[in-house]
Image (cartoon, grey):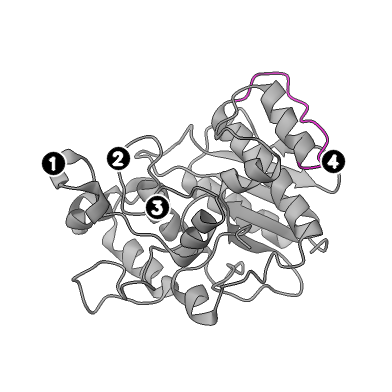
Amino acid sequence: MTRFRSFVAIDWSGAKGRRHKGIAIAEARGEAAPRLVRPDHVWSREEVAAWLLKRAASEPTLFGFDFSFAPPIVERGEYLLGEPGLPTTAREFWAYVDAQCDDDDLGAASFLEIAHRRHFYFGIADGVKADFVRFRQCDARLNAQGGRKTASAYDAIGAAQVAKASFSGMRLLRRLDGKVPIWPMDLLPANGSAIVEIYTRIYLRRAGMSGTKLRNRTSLNLALEGLASPPARLRFEPNDHQTDALVTAAGMRQLAADEPRAFEPEGLTPAIARSEGWTFGVL
């Protein structure tokens, strides 16, 4: 997989609004230290989409986004339990989510808070959290390997929740679908760019780091050293969105170069690829 000239990790945000301080983009090119892309800029999600399309056309790049590309469906047969007739493939579900939302900047709050409120856990008033939490096959595999994927696409409360980012991300994928291959819903192309789902903790684990968040240059560069990467050249102390992006970009590069199974993980079937997708790095 060294055919990719660059590896880009995008720390995503599902927050309401038109610009989002939680978005950070990092690039690992060749053997150089990973760098932040426009670190002082406050990105919109639409801007990220436009930037990605331009970049994807210019050189072979592997782009990673840290949200779930689809909710779980394999275990129970439905994305939204008790609502038959809804799509059963990720691509069709992206279109469904997009059609249900009228939020600014590819937001999806209306999907979670209005259109399908009963499927999402927002707090104790909703009942028992465990009744909402379900996982995909790749999440279960990561947990079995000790990777600790604990956040569910139906959990919409707290700092660790991924629901808002994931459903806004599905609107993004709808925009990118057919323009850049999205793995594993698409087969990995022999040439050109591609998009994958990422999870920073996988690369922290590969780097030998036990924590989940890095908030200074010292811990960041320790993680990069564990991923066989030169240290990042920053003149400021990064926030955790920036460190997540930097570590993951370096980790994607190392994984693609060193792991023959990176795009052929055990347990990934064509049916799972179409319906739930897979996280790059779960082998």
What is the CA distance from the residue labelled 1 to the residue labelled 2? 12 Å
From the viewer's perspective, is residue 78 above or below residue 222?
below
What is the CA distance from the residue labelled 1 to the residue labelled 4? 50 Å
- Tell me if residue 232 is in the magenta stretch: yes
Q: Residue at x 31, y 48 (%)?
A: 155
Q: Could you tell which of marks 1 and 4 lies nearer the N-terminus?
A: 4
**Amino acid of disc 4:** Ala
What is the CA distance from the residue labelled 4 to the residue labelled 2? 38 Å
Label disc, if present, on residue 209 of the rendered structure: none
Label disc, if present, on residue 32 of the rendered structure: 4
Residue highlighted by disc 3: 168
**Amino acid of disc 3:** Ser
Near mark 4 (Cα within 10 A), the count class, few <14, some 14-19 or many ≥20, is few
**Amino acid of disc 2:** Ile
Closer to the eye: label 1 or 4: 1
Please state which of residues 256 and 178 is positioned toward the viewer in this rendering.
Answer: 256
Near mark 3 (Cα within 10 A), the count class, few <14, some 14-19 or many ≥20, is many
Q: Could you tell which of marks 1 and 3 lies nearer the N-terminus?
A: 1
Q: Main secondary structure of the magenta part?
A: loop
Closer to the eye: label 4 or 2: 2
- SS of the residue under disc 2: loop
Quadrant where the C terminus sits is bottom right
